[in-house]
Image (spheres, coloured by chain):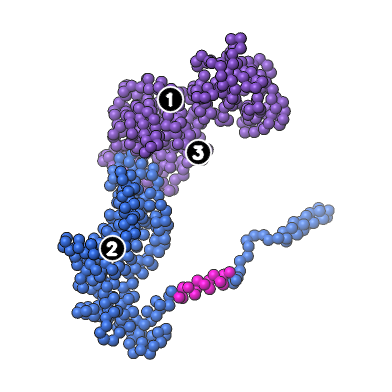
Amino acid sequence: MNANGSIAANSSKGTNGTSVSIQNLSLNFGAISVLQTLNLDVAEGEFIVLLGPSGCGKSTLLNCIAGLLDVSEGRIFIKGKNVTWEEPKDRGIGMVFQSYALYPQMTVEKNLSFGLRVAGLAKDEIAKRIARAAEILQIEPLLHRKPAALSGGQRQRVAIGRALVRDVDVFLFDEPLSNLDAKLRAELRVEIKLLHRKLENTMIYVTHDQIEAMTLADRIAVMKGGVIQQLDAPQTIYNRPVNRFVAGFLGSPAMNFLDGRLEQADGDWHFVVEDVRIPLATYAFEKNPVPGPAVFGIRPEHVAFNSGTGWPFAATANVEVVEPMGSDTLVWLKLAGQNFTVRVTAERTPNNAEAVGIGFDPMRASLFDAATGNRL
Amino acid sequence: MSDQAVSSPAIAGAGGLEAYGPSGPKPRHTFSRRNIFLYGTLIVVALYYLLPLYVMVVTSLKGMPEIRLGNIFSPPMEITFEPWVKAWSSACTGLNCDGLSRGFWNSVRITIPSVILSIALASVNGYALANWRFKGADTFFIILIVGAFIPYQVMIYPIVIILREVGLYGSLSGLVIVHSIFGMPILTLLFRNYFTSMPEELFRAARVDGAGFWGIYFRIMLPMSLPIFVVAIILQVTGIWNDFLFGVVYTRPDTYPMTVQLNNIVNSVQGVKEYNVNMAATILTGLVPLIVYFLSGKLFVRGIAAGAVKG
């Protein structure tokens, strides 16, 4: 909730440079609260990714922006205009769905032109816009096919085209790549990024895939339980997560967490778990630390492996499991009786039960309050 | 020499391995016990159901003297179409002696508008219930479904009074309205379930594209729901064509549907019972639903599977 407060502070009533502004938005389905007084400002031309586990309200938020769901409280501005009560078609948005949602009985061309025909645009204008969209997305040869005769990637291209021809300010993507196989997903991800660079539209993109979020976003909004946990640039979210949830949700393999205590000795703070003492001299505290239970988190790739001394913290441990992943290897150890993983280059794969040395700089770590999970 | 000596035992060994155990498709025996039992049962059951039809067709092609011989299973010695002609154009019901043809055309005039009206209403109904979740939609739907379980008998008399007050009692349009109302619960259920099974994102995409209630219905939903329309048409055509109760209650002798007229021909007490004419008249009456089933069998099954079972 504290993250919310800081976002609310710099929200304004759809002034210049703000493309989409969501103010105090709440949505309840009966007694269930899906979104709670949510605030979000999206700048002109910005690529925002709403990231979170299923059921966190990210798709619901997108549907509210699109006007497909009525909000319970709050307001939505698009381009400085209050669209809270507007129909989807009057909001200046285009939407791309996970299941593509192409009209099966229409050819690709008719699919693209449906919205324009409904709006009663002139024939030559429709043709012009379709030609442009087809060229951008390279779907000209497919125009006279029906969706059933297209591959998954082609279908999603057509679905993007349908948003494109509407000539809108804001693009909404609802998990557009989730139905594709891994290879196609990677390809289309790059295409969407190129498309954004070319069009410079505002894009709001919902996904549960952290790779998509990290690669595409200008800013990521990590959501949980209908609340935005953190809204920041991908690198900031990755390196300085505001709470334990964000830290654990982003990153694969996941961040290591050690449960222990914060202690002060001779003016220096230490993180203590059993006989392991991690010095925190290099750690940048968010606020003044107090002694007590805490969680220490560090990403597997920030741990050095068999690289000698010179680290603020170093220890030896026995290898339990080795997971080779091709490009690198994940080594599972036990540190102070708790699971601990280290990411190692493939060439340096150790043997099972081998005693290895690890070291890291707590500068790269994250400390969380044991009770609230907030960053310390 | 030595090469061959080395390689040939290896081949023989491989061949020897293949000789053991099953390989390739499992052989199937046409006259296995299982098949004989299965097909035997199917044939017996089919004969059991086809026999009455056979008797009817055969009898309708015989003259009365031949029928009096009493061999109902024997094929006609002399085929005559006289009974069919009589059943169609000159059999007597009460004072009218113009055969089933009058009832046929009455039934056509009842069935076609009833089918169109009930399906048009029910499909829009089902579409609204499935996609436009208005306030109280669920309650409305439950009330509608409960309506399907109220016995017809309870409503016959109230409807007679309503039709009389409105001035439609005894007219064909009155019966059309009654049929449309009584088709509503089951058809709405059918359409609602079908539209619910369609991806919701399609509906949302159409809304983002700016289509409204009728735009989405006519341009997106209708073209995608041919199977369920076929099912509804079959259900309604056969149901309304075969209806006897409403026909006899809500119409007058000159507007009787075919079923009621058939009953009057078959059950007339004066004179000789003309079995051949009765059989011909019955087959003629049943012909329309029969043709509908034959023409649409596959689509019917597909539509039922798509719409009716789920939900």
Q: Amino acid at mark 1?
A: Met
Say which element carries label 3.
helix
Chain name for mark 1: A
Main SS, magenta region, reads helix
Image colour assigned to chain B: blue
Picture quarter containing residue B31?
A: bottom right
Q: Amino acid at mark 2?
A: Val
Q: Position of residue B159 (x, y in %)?
A: 23, 62
Q: Which residue is mark 2?
A: B154
Q: Earlier in the sequence, mark 1 or mark 3?
A: 1
Q: Amino acid at mark 3?
A: Leu
User: Can residue A23 be seen at all in this image of the molecule?
Assistant: yes
Viewer-side residue, B290 vs B173: B173
Q: Which residues are magenta?
A: B34-48
Q: Position of residue B76 (x, y in %)?
A: 38, 85
Picture quarter containing residue B152?
A: bottom left
Looking at the image, residue B230 lies above or below residue A213: below
User: Can residue B105 be seen at all in this image of the molecule?
Assistant: no
Magenta-drawn stretch contains B46: yes
Q: How many numbered circles does the render carry?
A: 3
Chain name for mark 3: A
Say which element carries label 2.
helix
Chain name for mark 2: B
Q: Position of residue A134 (x, y in %)?
A: 38, 38
Q: Which residue is mark 3?
A: A184
Query: At 38% from the left edge and 22% from the top edge, which residue is drawn?
Result: A8
Image colour assigned to chain A: purple
| Left or right of residue B36, residue A331 in this image | right
Looking at the image, residue A255 lies above or below residue A123: above
Query: At 25% from the left edge and 64% from the top edge, which residue is drawn?
Result: B156
Please state which of the two labelled residues, at mark 1 or mark 3, is closer to the viewer.
Answer: 1
Query: At 67% from the left edge and 60% from the top edge, which residue is drawn?
Result: B23
